[in-house]
Image (cartoon, helix red, strand yellow):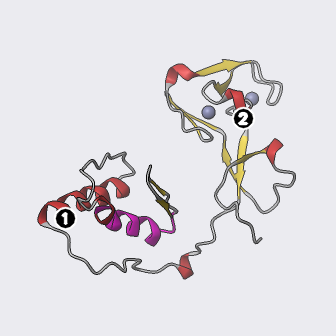
Amino acid sequence: MQTNIEGRLFSKEEIPDTKNMQQVKAVEVKENKKMCLRCGNNQEELFFRSPCSHCGSENCWYCRNCIIMGKMTECGSLFYFPGRTSISSRKSNYLAWKGELSPGQKIASAKVHHAVVEKENLLLWAVAGSGKTEMMFEGMNEVLINGGRLCVASLEWTFV
Ligand SMILES: [Zn+2]
Ligand SMILES: [Zn+2]
């Protein structure tokens, strides 16, 4: 299907036909860890249980963090079209920049790359003109090699 909404998550109410769509649980409940797949909330105090008309459970977990957009429950699902980047069309390298990082920039670049691989949050904080963009290239390349998507946003400018 040709569409510009690949990867975006929809609730059943938001999409008329879920045929050909992938499905994930709206709220994942694992032992003592919960995660809302719509808003990314994983704070224990923002999950509550209530009797659920959908699944019939007396104690169905739901996310309070994004409830203003409709209730996401552990018995509910979110639907998405898989991304366009099939494994066969991926490149082994997306880097076109021919510049050279300084020793300090290389250290930061390696940390960005590591954070991407480990799926960790990282704040890359440096003065304007220090090459933050270039320090992100290795990490961005890693995302694209693995078929992921990325968004780079800035107060001054945006590119994807
Ligand atoms: Zn339920
Ligand atoms: Zn949520």
Q: Pointer 1: what residue?
A: 106
Q: Pointer 2: what residue?
A: 75
Element assignment for label 1: helix
Which tag is nearer the camera, tag 1 or tag 2? 1
Q: Quadrant of residue 22?
A: bottom right
Q: Say whether residue 15 is left or right of residue 108.
A: right
Element assignment for label 2: loop
Residue 100 pos. (x, y %) = 20, 75
133, above or below 90, in the image: above
Query: Who comes first in sequence, dot 1 or dot 2?
Result: 2
Q: Which residue, as the protein is rendered here, is positioned at the far left?
A: 103
Beta carbon at label 2 within 8 Å of ligand 1: yes
What's the amino acid at mark 2?
Cys
Residue 58 counted in the magenta span? no
Residue 117 pos. (x, y %) = 36, 58
Residue 158 pos. (x, y %) = 49, 59
Q: Quadrant of ligand 1?
A: top right
Magenta segment boundaries in residue numbering: 135-148
Q: Which residue, as the protein is rendered here, is positioned at the far right?
A: 16
Label 1, label 2: how far apart the Cα atoms are: 46 Å
